[in-house]
Amino acid sequence: MTVSGPLRVAGFLAVLGGVFAAALGVGYAVGPVSEPISDDMAGHAAAEDDHAAAGHAPAVDEEIPGGLMVAQGGYRFNLLTPLAEPGRGVPILFRIDGPDGRPVAAYDVEHGKRLHLIAVRRDFSGFQHVHPRLGNDRTWRAELDLTPGEWRLFADFNPTGGVGMVLGADLTLRGPYHPAGAPVPSRTVRVDGYAVSLAGELTAGTDSTLTLTVSRNGRPVTDLQPYLQAYGHLVALREGDLAYLHVHPEGAPGDGTTQPGPDIVFDAAVPSVGKYRLFLDFKHGDVVRTAEFALTAGAGRGGEGSHEHAH
């Protein structure tokens, strides 16, 4: 028997309505479907709530160290020369692009400069701290002494009206690569006839006091010269990812209490246990020299990355 079109549709709708009504009735009878929760799962959920209530924020909320990203907060480190030939005075060009996509023109002065550029090869050799020139085209220009291999560049700046940040970019130098060996652990290093000793320990998740003492020919140097508005500048880089960490000197030349050596005191904050490389710039006899250290950070109270971490 053949059923006409209108009758076929009417019959289909009637059946569909019956099925829907039956399903709705079953739903009311048994309630919403969900995954059964065992006593163990309930206890785990309650523990997580207690953990959050105690102020333990998820790891993703922790501050990301500087230098790991090429872009942040709408700003981008635009390296215009990502591939170069090794040599002395190698020209490096870059721009800092702002949230509007255009190169940033205005920067706040920090430690006497509008932008600090740090360069280091990924084996931690060749460390350089320079101050590029900003052209009328809003392009930064610097000259670096570079050897073959992979380098990391860090731009440390504060755009006017914004916040201070450190962005990182990779630079490749052509040629045969010969990696540097691991440093010999030592609390005293020598550079150009000077001896620099390090006292203090790095502790993950909290501020650590580090004291660098400069001497020459066995005598303490008590007439260090101000360099970038301080008697010393310290850069800390984490092994593995080259995270750039903030290290702040205590006091300043001319404040009435800070002495020009032999001690230079810093507050350092590192987020994790592990190995770090430290680079101290100090000025004496009108020459800036760099002392390099390798230091291991231990766990703080409550384990690695305690939430007492501060900058």
Image (cartoon, grey):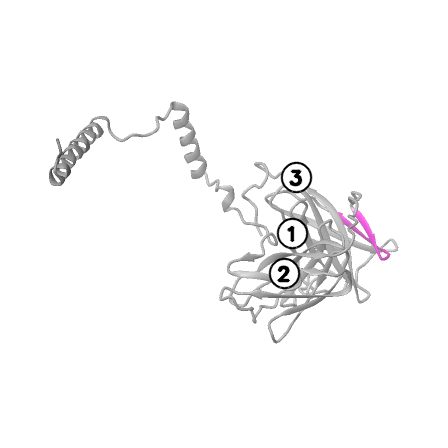
281 and 178: which is toward the camera: 178
Q: CA distance from mark 2 to mark 3?
A: 28 Å
In the rendered image, residue 18, in percent from the top left (x then y), is placed at 15, 31
Query: x and y percent of residue 234 in the render?
Result: 70, 55
Q: Give the SS element for disc 3.
A: loop
Name of the residue lying farthest toward the front: 1
Quick check: 24 above or below 105?
Answer: above
- Dot 3: few (<14), some (14–19), or many (≥20) neighbours within 10 Å? some
- Residue that badge 2 annotates: 155
Tags 1 and 2 touching, CB below 8 Å: no
SS for dot 2: strand
Magenta residues?
Answer: 188-198
Q: Earlier in the sequence, mark 2 or mark 3?
A: 2
- Which residue: 59% across, 61% down? 77
Say which amino acid is labelled 2.
Answer: Ala
Q: Which residue is mark 1?
A: 267
Residue 95, located in which quarter of the rendered image? bottom right
In the rendered structure, which disc, 1 or 2, sits on the residue that comes first in sequence? 2
Which quadrant holds the N terminus? top left
| Outermost residue to the right | 217
Q: Which mark is residue 298?
A: 3
Residue 245, given in percent of the width and then of the height, sits at 63, 52
